[in-house]
Amino acid sequence: MQDIEIARSVKLKSIESVGKSLGLKKNDLLCYGENMAKIVGEFQPKENSKLILVTAINPTKAGEGKTTVAIGLADGLKRLGINVCLALREPSMGPVFGIKGGATGGGRAQIAPMEEINLHFTGDFHAITSANNLLAALIDNHIFQGNELGINPEEVKFQRCLDVNDRALREVTAGGRKQSFVITAASEIMAILCMAENLRDLKVRLGNILVGMNYVGRPVYARDLKAVEALTILLKDALKPNLVQTLEGTPAIVHCGPFANIAHGCNSVRATKTALALSDYVVTEAGFGADLGAEKFLDFKCREAGLSPSAVVIVCTIRALKLHGGVKFEDLGKENLDALKKGCENLKRHISVIKNVYKLPYVVTLNKFTEDSEKEIALLKKLFKNTIVENNVWADGGNGALELGKEVVKCCEKKAKLSFAYKKEDSIEKKIESIVKKVYGGKGITLSEKVKKELAFAKAHGFDKLPVIIAKTQYSLSADAKLLGAPKGFVVNVEDIQIRAGAGFIVAVCGKMLLMPALSARPAALGMSVDENEIISGLF
């Protein structure tokens, strides 16, 4: 049975009753039909609430079910009698119609209504795209209408965006100059919405967007264009977190959706703090492996927002471990004990990062797939001295995460103080190098001539103390997608530096990373259909 059919087979609670389970009243909700709502108002975390981060090893191209595990874990904790809430990212339509499918979980561990969430939801992505492109239009119009600010068209930094995987938009000519689009999930407006605590903070961050340079080499900001109020009008509702539920009725706050390989990979600060205010345990996730989403969640989001996880769950799968052991993607369903053993080095590296760099308690969980053999599962457990907890949330929902839930509760009882991979006062180069050495396990970095110029500019204008977000492949601990397992001695090439002053970070683009994904030879969109009754098929 497809995920969409499983989701349709469950009768959902009214969104008002879901809100009531969190202590929310009717006037705390702005309802979008019977099953979705936005949460109105600002909330601050309770002193003793527990934040649980779900991350994973470096994935296969199909993903390892990290979001599914996060959802199943929350359902499992609820079954254990715990007051729990999910805090997840919103799906981008790029992957939905591309290769991976949606981001609402799978099987019996889903958030719902999955069709609406995976498509237009409450319109947040559209609002972000519109605000982003309004600013781009205002920049070009200002230049056309006399250019009072003296903006140098060749030094415009701000890019247009679209929530579609479209390689043709990587290089376009518009307004008489070469430009490139980024996917909405990688846009600065998305990152700003993720970090904004309230409307006042949102306005300040929007005003701080670095538009470009003028002819005498000075920065021009969005506030200089008088663009802030118009952008805020488009984003005022998108700033409010969205409330939905799992198939088992567990509350889920789903808000914002930056990718972890090309952005910072976490849901919004406002959503996380709201969940921590309304429940005792909050399960959240950060994209891809500990080298990407977890690193950015911990080094950037937690540090900037004053958050600290009580526990980290590291998701692994037999198939991903075999991939890191040298098995081709098409052969991952075949038993291969030697490759599994070899691939475990990748998992060991991610464990080391959480344990030794960030100093946090952790639980490793095996997300089971039907093709996993008993011999493979037994070997994995033996290699890790029976410390790995199995889960079967895809098939059994919360019931398949009871053991995992119990281990997570034990883990949360341990005392932990979050450490970081770098110091805020470090130079940009030092921050990047620290992440490469401490988190990726690499030897060092190289800087292109373009990057050296950008770094000099950043230092001259006070941007050099901002945190760093590294954009790189999700498939390897390095910046080379083909370098699997747990490589050592590699060097990461920094190809570009982008200043996101509004969001509050510097993007370091490494390797051949592109900020606008492309479609595959046969994208998921080609397998979808909708009948005369508007029943959708093929949406995962």
Image: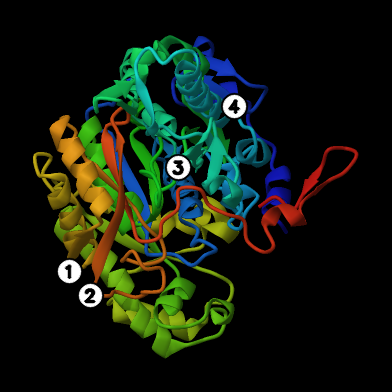
* Viewer-nearest of discs 3 and 2: 2
Q: Dividing the picture into quarters, in which one does residue 513 lie?
A: bottom left
* Viewer-nearest of discs 4 and 1: 1
**What residue lies at 69% left-to-right and 37% top-to-bottom?**
11
Residue corresponding to mark 2: 488
| 538 relative to 230, above or below | below
Residue corresponding to mark 4: 123
Categorize mark 3 by other alpha carbons within 10 Å: few (<14), some (14-19), many (20+): many
Of residues 461 and 521, the one nearer the viewer is: 461
Of residues 468 and 49, the one nearer the viewer is: 468
Kindly report the distance in space between the C-alpha atoms of the residues bearing marks 3 and 2: 41 Å
Q: Are marks 1 and 3 in contact (CB under 8 Å)?
A: no
**What residue lies at 45% left-to-right and 15% top-to-bottom?**
232
Kindly report the distance in space between the C-alpha atoms of the residues bearing marks 4 and 2: 44 Å
Locate residue 177 relative to residue 442 in the image: left or right.
Answer: right
Q: Dividing the picture into quarters, in which one does residue 301 lie?
A: top left
Q: Are marks 2 and 1 in contact (CB under 8 Å)?
A: yes
Q: In the rendering, at what x and y percent does residue 433 appear?
A: 17, 57
Residue corresponding to mark 3: 78
* Viewer-nearest of discs 1 and 3: 1
Categorize mark 4 by other alpha carbons within 10 Å: few (<14), some (14-19), many (20+): few
Residue corresponding to mark 1: 443
For marks 4 and 1 on the same chain, the one whose residue lies earlier in the sequence: 4
Outermost residue toward the bottom? 338
For marks 2 and 1 on the same chain, the one whose residue lies earlier in the sequence: 1
SS at circle 1: loop
Q: Amino acid at mark 2?
A: Lys
For marks 3 and 4 on the same chain, the one whose residue lies earlier in the sequence: 3
**What residue lies at 59% left-to-right and 60% top-to-bottom?**
395
Kindly report the distance in space between the C-alpha atoms of the residues bearing marks 1 and 3: 44 Å
Locate residue 40 relative to residue 6 in the image: left or right.
Answer: left
Q: Amino acid at mark 1?
A: Lys
